[in-house]
């Protein structure tokens, strides 16, 4: 159920859905998703579906992980650092860490943060820094600026602190909730200000304030 053949089938499916970035496909083929879910769900890890990870949260659907990562890589140049809001089980973090030299990720639920930390260390991702903190305030060290920011929980307002931590020319990808629908949104910090692009409909858990 976690064999290379099962994984390859998932990659084919991602390609059929329009994921064409070779680097993204390659990394998704290699990073073991079954390590990031409960053992009882490991046999479903290579289905293209979100799965529960406890605490009312879910591991994102592989297509969504691939699509968001692909969006982060669309612009010219080689982005160096990325900040993720919502570590969850750490799977998207692992995908990012396989591509970006520096990955920073924050999670508001302590138990998930601890678990992700353990898994990512076991898989020897040494280029990841995790924090148990509320991501609406951005990365705790305010002097940090990121080439890319990815949010894996839906927000109803774009947190100002995140915009402030996005480098000029930087790109932020997030699910935006306008009160009716959630849409994948790509925001570029250009010289003229923020340029927003609305993409497909999505379904994410909400961005919540405070810590648990
Ligand atoms: N990429 C993760 C997605 C998990 S779901 C994965 O595939 O596992 C979204 C996560 O965002 C949840 O773990 C939730 O606890 C976290 N989250 C929600 N609001 C947050 C906030 N303000 N700061 C940090 N994390 C938050």
Image (spheres, rainbow, N blue to C red):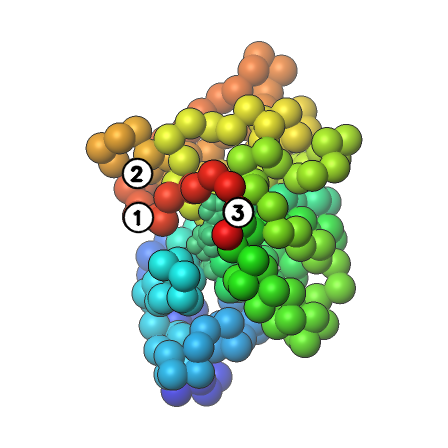
- In the image shown, does 23 or 88 lie closer to the viewer? 88
| Location of residue 23 (image quadrant) | bottom right
The tag earlier along the polypeptide, 2 or 1, is 2
- Tell me if residue 61 comes above or below residue 201 in the rendering: below
Expressed as whole percent of the image width and height from the top left, the position of residue 186 reads 46, 34
Q: Residue extending furthest left?
A: 180
Labels 3 and 2 touching (C-beta < 8 A): no
Mark 3, other Cα within 10 Å: few <14 / some 14–19 / many ≥20: few
Expressed as whole percent of the image width and height from the top left, the position of residue 78 reads 69, 43
Quote the CA–CA distance across marks 3 and 2. Answer: 24 Å
Residue beneath label 2, please? 182
| Location of residue 135 (image quadrant) | top right
The disc label shown at residue 165, or none: none
Quote the CA–CA distance across marks 2 and 1. Answer: 6 Å
Residue beneath label 3, please? 211
The answer, for residue 82, to whether it is visible in the render is yes
**Relative side of 186 to 178, left or right:** right
Q: Secondary structure at mark 3?
A: loop
Labels 2 and 1 touching (C-beta < 8 A): yes
Residue beneath label 1, please? 203
Identify the residue shown where x is 41% and y is 35%: 155
Identify the residue shown where x is 71% and y is 54%: 129
The N terminus sits in image quarter: bottom left
Quote the CA–CA distance across marks 3 and 1. Answer: 22 Å
The answer, for residue 72, to whether it is visible in the render is no
- Tell me if residue 197 comes above or below residue 99 in the rendering: above
| In this view, the mark in front (3 or 2) | 3
- Tell me if residue 1 comes above or below residue 130 in the rendering: below
Identify the residue shown where x is 67% and y is 54%: 130
């Amino acid at each position: 159920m976690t064999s290379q053949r099962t994984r390859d089938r998932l990659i084919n499916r991602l390609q059929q859905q329009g994921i064409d970035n070779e680097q993204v496909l390659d990394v998704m083929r290699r990073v073991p998703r079954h390590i990031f879910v409960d053992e009882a769900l490991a046999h479903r890890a290579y289905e293209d579906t979100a799965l529960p990870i406890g605490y009312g949260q879910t591991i994102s659907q592989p297509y969504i992980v691939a699509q968001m990562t692909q969006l982060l890589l669309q612009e010219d140049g080689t982005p160096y650092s990325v900040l993720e809001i919502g570590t969850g089980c750490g799977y998207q973090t692992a995908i990012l860490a396989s591509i970006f030299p520096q990955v920073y990720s924050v999670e508001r639920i302590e138990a998930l943060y601890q678990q992700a930390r353990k898994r990512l260390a076991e898989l020897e991702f040494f280029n990841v820094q995790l924090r148990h903190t509320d991501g609406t305030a951005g990365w705790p060290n305010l002097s940090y600026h990121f080439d890319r920011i990815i949010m894996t929980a839906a927000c109803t307002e774009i947190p100002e602190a995140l915009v402030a931590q996005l480098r000029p020319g930087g790109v932020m990808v997030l699910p935006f909730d306008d009160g009716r629908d959630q849409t994948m949104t790509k925001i570029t910090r250009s010289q003229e200000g923020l340029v927003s692009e609305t993409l497909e409909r999505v379904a994410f858990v909400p961005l919540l304030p405070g810590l648990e």
